[in-house]
Image (spheres, grey):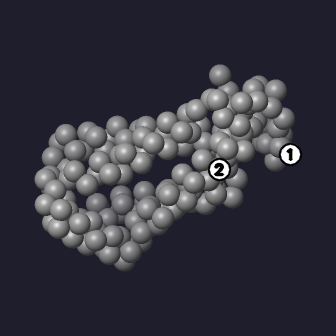
Amino acid sequence: MIALPTYQRIVRASAWYDLVVTIGFATPWTFAAVHTLLLWTIQTLQLPGSFPAFDPVHMLMANLLGSVVTVWAVLRIRDPRLRYGRYDAVARFLFATWQIYAVTQGASLIILGFTAMELLFGVLESLPVRGATARTPMRADDRATGLSASPQP
């Protein structure tokens, strides 16, 4: 069991990781550079699996992902509350599932580096938090929206 301040540092660290890794996906111009860097890494390390060029629809999906994850990361950096960490853990396990599926379907093994980080932060954000119960006081902005600082059963 970990203390809430420690948990909040984990949530903030995972958000910084997300921001650094995914902000490059947010625009077509930055993603072109990220794609080139990933392709160079795959070729240099001679990793198996495919990593094709992106057509405009692929680019759109990458940019949508990058945009949403960037905004989600900024939110968790500014407000690393328990509830956000729990939701993030679920998202990370979903991401890891689809990344593993993609690799089993022939995608490049470079994806597994990202998968390892998803699983690491997913586990850390799933840890029990000492003192976090249904009685954890709500913040003023949570009371206004009906949200509490602790996860609901």
Question: Is residue 30 at all visible to an observer of this figure?
Answer: yes
Residue highlighted by disc 2: 9
Residue 126: x %, y % from top left: 55, 33
Question: Is residue 72 at all visible to an observer of this figure?
Answer: no
Residue highlighted by disc 1: 140
Which amino acid does the dot numbered 1 rest on?
Answer: Ala
Left of 77 or right of it: where is 32?
left
Q: Residue furthest top?
A: 153
Left of 119 or right of it: where is 48?
left
Q: Secondary structure at mark 1?
A: helix
Which amino acid does the dot numbered 2 rest on?
Answer: Arg
Q: Secondary structure at mark 2?
A: helix
Give the answer, above or below, for where 101 lies relative to 10.
Answer: above
Give the answer, above or below, for where 54 lies relative to 133.
Answer: below
- Give the quadrant of the C terminus: top right
Residue 23: x %, y % from top left: 47, 66
